[in-house]
Amino acid sequence: LRELFFPGVAVPFSRTRPDCERIHREMGKSGVTLTLLWQEYCEECRQNGDIPLMYSQFCLCYQKYARSANATMRMVRKPGESAEVDWAGQKGFWLDPETGERFEASIFVGVLSSSRYAYVEAFPSQNQESWLNAHANMFRYFGGVPRILIPDNLKTGIAKPDRYEPVVNRLYRELAEHYGTAVIPTRVGKPRDKANAEGTVGTISTWVLAALRERNFFSLRELNEGIREKLDRFNAKPFQKKEGSRLDAFLAEEKDLLLPLPKNPYELSSWKKVTADKSYHVLVEKMLYSVPYEYIGHEMEVRLTRSVVEVFFEGQRICSHARIFGRIGQCVTVPSHMPPSHREHRQWEGSRFIEWAADVGPHTEIVMRGLLSAHKIEQQSYKSCQGLVRLGDVHSFERLEAACGKALLYTPRPGYRNVKTILTTGQDRVDPVAASEKKPEEEARESLGGIVRGAEYYRGGNDRC
């Protein structure tokens, strides 16, 4: 009312300043934002009869405090939110116990952004496998997973650096998805985006690697045992400018806020391109796995782990199989992958073919066993075996048995065509007594279904044509 009736009279007043130190502590907690803290601050002012700052003034006040406290990027690193990962510039070394040859080891460093709790491990190289295994081991050491991973733009992590839409390496993305975390790389040329890891790398070089410089290690495992010993001491070492240690901060503020580890551990995978053959199978590590028959002739991608084979077409998974080991050439076929006509003959497998042939007769069984053993991969013989079954349907079991017996007189391993020729030419119906009276040349001519010339033909003369 005073302002309404006496607008020209200024009434001096002061607004209550927020507790910036408390705000800074609260900002370190997961889910807390400046907007939420401003709303709580306004409510507190109203309860006390004070006048709060506007939101823009509130933020400006806190920013000034943060700058004066040198709390730039750290103020947005909430417990359990992120981990910064990198390869250290300094190398570790180990010696071959027999030759004395010196081997170089790359050092992986991972740091939780809030508590600065660190993980360090030596690897034989900085390749993709080492990078992924380092992360899996780091999560196991932390006992949980941060929500964000912050790497540099290295090739084993980032396939295509970009300021706005960086492309994460496929295998690295798979690892992140398995653990439920996200990969957000630093901006190119912006090391302060990953200041904790950058700073810890230098400190680690002094407290861990330099401290081991006088010790000889005779395997990578021994080197990592030495690193782990120094790492545990490093994490328990008191901070210089504040109370507690990295371990204290981790246990008190961060450990319980990490995402839980997945039930199944991460399995390193590899990818390869394959094409489905006419038998609707793909060849992976010398084993055959079926795909839906509609994909015959199409190029696909296979993701291979220690336990699973997954097949993808145009980015979509179309099937998966448990991976098989042992004898080369084994085949896994899912009935639903087969065309309808093949599904009808699903029961015709090796043992079933032999069982059927045995019912026909002993000669047919011998021929069938020979067909099944004609190829390294048994399934490659199935068409010939089905052909033999078809001959029994077209003619009769009696004729087929006789034809197989006839074929076995000429070769111990007759093929499908041999038996078919005998049946189509009627040789299975020839009287054995009459056949025994024929000359050898005539018998061979009939059995082979071809033209066999006698010895007289080659003795000379001009009447050969």
Image (cartoon, rainbow, N blue to C red):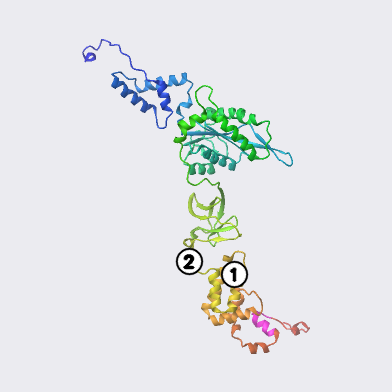
Q: Is residue 82 left or right of residue 234?
A: left
Q: Position of residue 35 (x, y in %)?
A: 37, 27
Secondary structure predominantly adopted by residues drawn in magenta: helix
Q: In this view of the protein, which residue sits in the foreground, 31 or 208?
A: 208
Instruction: Name above or below for residue 193 compared with residue 2.
Output: below
Q: Which is closer to the viewer, label 2 or label 1?
A: 1
Is disc 2 placed on a helix, strand or loop?
helix
Residue 374, by quadrant, is bottom right
- In this rendering, the answer to whether 249 lies above or below 441 is above
Crowding at label 2, few (<14), some or many (≥20) Cα neighbours within 10 Å?
some
* Image quarter hosting the C terminus: bottom right
Q: CA distance from mark 2 to mark 1?
A: 20 Å
Would residue 88 be counted in the magenta stretch?
A: no
Which residue range is magenta in the image?
441-451
As shown in the figure, which amino acid type bears the numbered disc 1?
Leu
Task: Return the residue found at the far top.
Answer: 9
| Residue located beneath label 2 in the image | 343
The answer to which quarter of the image holds residue 29 is top left
Under mark 2, the amino acid is: Arg
Which secondary structure, mark 1?
A: helix
Of 140 and 23, nearer the camera is 140
Q: Is residue 259 left or right of residue 275?
A: left
Residue 443: in magenta span: yes
Q: At 51% across and 77% down in the image, what residue appears?
A: 393
Q: Which mark is residue 372?
A: 1
Q: Position of residue 281 (x, y in %)?
A: 54, 59
Q: Position of residue 30 (x, y in %)?
A: 42, 32
| Residue drawn at x 58%, y 66% as measured from the top left | 378
